[in-house]
Amino acid sequence: PEKGPEGLLKLLVELDDKIPKSWLPPQLLGPVNDKFGDVCKEWLGQKADCALPLLFAAGFFTLFTLLLTLCLLPRLFKREKKLPTVHELCEKDPDLKTFINYWEDLGPGGMWDRPDLRREEHDRFIVFAPDNNAFVRQTALIFSISKEEWRRMLISHVVVDSADPPLAPAQITHLSSIKSHTNYEIPLRVIRDKFTDGSTMQLEPVTACNGLLYKIKSILPVTTIAKKTPT
């Protein structure tokens, strides 16, 4: 590159052509332009035919715009990563494939209304989803109850939390039970693992944008469900 004032001026003019002014939001660029214009008028006075000061001023403004853009871009485009829904968490977890497949098979109609775990507005959900092995162990129970009873049993694994503010995991830890969407009292011992030495470990939920997901190891014992009468 050329040295001296001439080389600097050429470099500033090139930068002025290459820096996209559209990077800055209009509400910020407008006041900056107005302020810079006032400064230039005050500095140059009424004699605007002076090429060197004008080029220097244009180059200075270009560098100023570039530095301001680099400072503001991270803030303008920074977005918080959106959490998945409870439904999406179940779909992504291979251990919950059986639960979410059965849940989808229920359909939206029926005696017991199935909450939409994809919904992000209004209520939050607390889902106690049995893993795949839980359904394998309870195959006999699943085939011994009616379609309506099966529907109620599966929906009983979901709590619609209408509290304001919603229940936090720390609050759920201290509860002995919680009422499900079907009014079944879920015993919260299902989220506590007990070891042979008598110690227990609290299961931690996965947080979704519309609630909490607990992965449990057994199907909830909905004791009020009656078995089919053999024919």
Image (cartoon, rainbow, N blue to C red):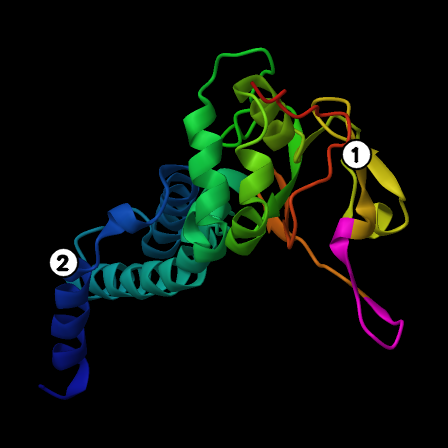
Query: Residue at the location (63% across, 20% down)?
Result: 229
Observer-nearest of 102 and 47: 102
Amino acid under disc 2: Asp
Q: Position of residue 31 (x, y in %)?
A: 43, 41
- Local SS, label 2: helix
The residue tagged 2 is: 17
Observer-nearest of 210 and 30: 210
> In which quarter of the view is residue 60 placed?
bottom left
Q: CA distance from mark 2 to mark 1?
A: 54 Å
Q: Earlier in the sequence, mark 2 or mark 1?
A: 2
Looking at the image, can residue 23 be seen? yes
- Local SS, label 1: loop
User: Which image quarter holds the C terminus?
Assistant: top right
> In which quarter of the view is residue 5 placed?
bottom left
Observer-nearest of 85 and 23: 85
Residue 196: assigned label:
none
